[in-house]
Amino acid sequence: MSPRDSRFSQWVRAAAFPVVLGLMAVCIAFSQKPGGDQSAPSPEAPRRETAGILSFAPVVEKVAPSVVSIHTSRTVKVPRMLRDFFGAPNSGVTQGLGSGVIVSRDGYILTNNHVTDGADGVFVTIGKDRKEYKAKKIGADPGTDLAVLKIEGNNFPAIPFADSDKVRVGDIVLAVGNPFGLTQTVTMGIISGLGRSGMGIIDYENFIQTDASVNPGNSGGALVDAEGRLIGINTAIFSRSGGNQGIGFAVPSNLAVQVLNSIRAKGRVERGYLGTVIQPVTREIAVVMKLKSASGALVSDVTPGSPAAKAGLAPGDVIVAVNGKGVDTPRELRLAIGSLAPGSKVKVKFVRDGEEKEVEATLGELPPTETRLAPEEGRPGPTPAPASSFLDGVRLRDLLDEYREALGIPPSVKGAIIVEVDPDSVAYRAGLRQGHVIVEINRKPVGDAEQAQEVGGAVKKGDPVLLRVWSGGQSQYLAISPRPEN
């Protein structure tokens, strides 16, 4: 497990807990009870009749047999310095520990991808008899940090699924897993939040947050409701110490079912692809674009030949709904499109020039990997660049071949390149950087520095300006409010 450091705290996945060489497998200390056939899990709405409950023992007895211990082995190379100095062998074996949930009577198991990623061997321990099974990894989806395992046999105790879309903040939940290498442990709490995202843990973040204690080793374990139905797969914790601090995150069961069914059917997850580069609608952008609110997904670029391009979507459009369901953020659009199968027809509602429009698009398949390059800094021109007449502290030049070569700017990109930005300027604080290419000013295309000065010069001093800039292989919109004239 390798924690993610941040300025004030750490993200710690409730990870496959690393232990010393030769770690013995832990097991579940509860008896097996056969469950219903879950080969195609059908979610049930959670029930909330919990008043007067004095013990959750019946719920735990129902759930415990379905939550398994997973331990893995990995062969790692020993650094040459250690081999030379200590006479160590060329390689060694490390072991890790996590949890999993049986989801079908014929032995399919859901867990986290990071529990089994890179493992040479995966083993599952079930029940009081400590019976161990060698598991086969059927497939994984790094975008949701989920993996599907299979063990041979039948009549395994499969867990029932709840409809995670119907859970509410405040609902009682139980987290079941194997933290810190202990045998099965149960903790209780409530749902603290829904739809948590923007944490950079996985690509498709839509976490259920809970204050039920979740620790390293809980990864892949069950988050269940008061009736013992699965509402999430425990995945990560927010921690400064590496241990529980009352903020745990789980992948919702409805999303887990989609991943499970796709992997079982095709060995991988297929996601819909629209072909747009999107960004949030900030308050400043909403003001400049005269939008009713700072919500939706702003299209900053459209991939040529993509479903979005064929449907007529264009940069500057603000997508506000997909198939009648509102879209308030880029994350919601990404989840909405990614949850649909390639070939699906979708109705996309968007705002263009203050007017609502709707188009129908046929989704393609999301490419297996997408690379987004960070903006690079440009090189100053051979001669002094003129100061911008409409952006204080910014100097522009024509997009010369040397800039294109240095920054990998394709011939299709036209505009004026920024060669200098004053770090104390409003433009810098808004996000403009050396090497950015201004391609539009207030929705008007510009072909070179002179045209940028001309179009920008028409902006009244003190009025906000909307720029579309290209950098690192993609475009984005920036709203800038220049200092008013003294």
Image (cartoon, grey):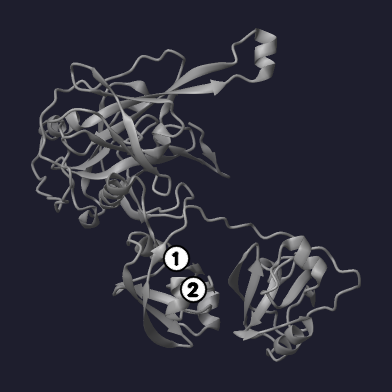
Residue for point 55% across, 76% down: 284
Q: Could you tell me which residue is drawn at 45 percent across and 52 percent down?
A: 203
> Looking at the picture, how far across and down is residue 147, in whole percent?
35, 40
| Left or right, 271 with reference to 305 | left
Q: In which quarter of the image is residue 140?
A: top left
| Secondary element at tag 1 | helix
The answer to whether residue 427 is visible is yes
Where is residue 406, by image quadrant? bottom right
Residue 330 circle label? 1
Picture coordinates of residue 385 (x, y %)?
A: 86, 75
Residue designated by label 2: 298
Query: Quick check: marks 1 and 2 in contact, CB under 8 Å?
Result: yes
Question: Residue 252's x, y, as percent?
Answer: 29, 49
In this view, which residue lies farthest toward the top?
Answer: 87
Residue visible at 32% across and 67% down in the picture: 344
Q: x and y percent of residue 381 in the render?
A: 86, 69
Q: Nearer the viewer, residue 278 or 189?
A: 278
Residue type at numbered disc 2: Leu
Residue 43 versus residue 361 in the image, above or below: above
Cα separation, mark 1 vs mark 2, equals: 8 Å
Q: Is mark 2 on a helix, strand or loop?
A: strand
Inspect the image, locate mark 1, and give the three-letter code of the amino acid beneath it: Pro
